[in-house]
Amino acid sequence: MQSVNIHEAKTHLSRLVEDAAHGKSFIIAKAGKPMVKVIPYSAEEQTGMGRLGFMSGEIRVPDDFDQMGTELISALFEGKDR
């Protein structure tokens, strides 16, 4: 896999991105140390995102959730012991 330094990546970013889009991944390094890996984006990867509600029915939030611990929090802010 090709490794390029940051300066080279900035200089040739368009070409490198085009290569990555066609399956030729590369690594960007800083002072010879690998920092990031650039890989082609795949539409399949997006399917795992946006899973809002995926644990519906498995977690219960108490009705007084927004009031839980208010006495302790107030005491801590006021510098009092419980």
Image (cartoon, rainbow, N blue to C red):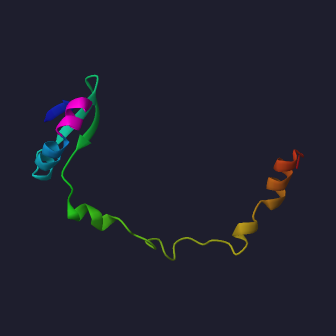
Residue drawn at (20%, 35%), measured in percent from left and top?
11
The dominant secondary structure in magenta is helix
Residue drawn at (47%, 71%), measured in percent from left and top?
55
Q: Where is the N terminus found, in terms of image quarters?
A: top left
x, y percent for residue 9: 21, 36
As drawn, the residue found furthest toward the top would be 31
Q: Is residue 68 above or below residue 53?
A: above
Q: Is residue 58 above or below residue 71?
A: below
x, y percent for residue 66: 71, 68
- Where are the magenta residues, as a range? 5-12
Instruction: Residue 79: name its quadrant.
Output: top right
Q: Is residue 80 left or right of residue 42?
A: right
Total numbered circles: 0
Residue drawn at (25%, 23%), measured in percent from left and top?
32
- Residue 7 located within the stretch drawn in magenta: yes
Closer to the camera, 65 or 41? 41
- Residue 22 located within the stretch drawn in magenta: no
Instruction: Residue 81: name its quadrant.
Output: top right
Residue drawn at (14%, 52%), measured in percent from left and top?
21
x, y percent for residue 54: 43, 71
x, y percent for residue 30: 29, 27
Q: Is residue 16 above or below residue 75?
A: above
Q: Is residue 31 left or right of residue 53?
A: left
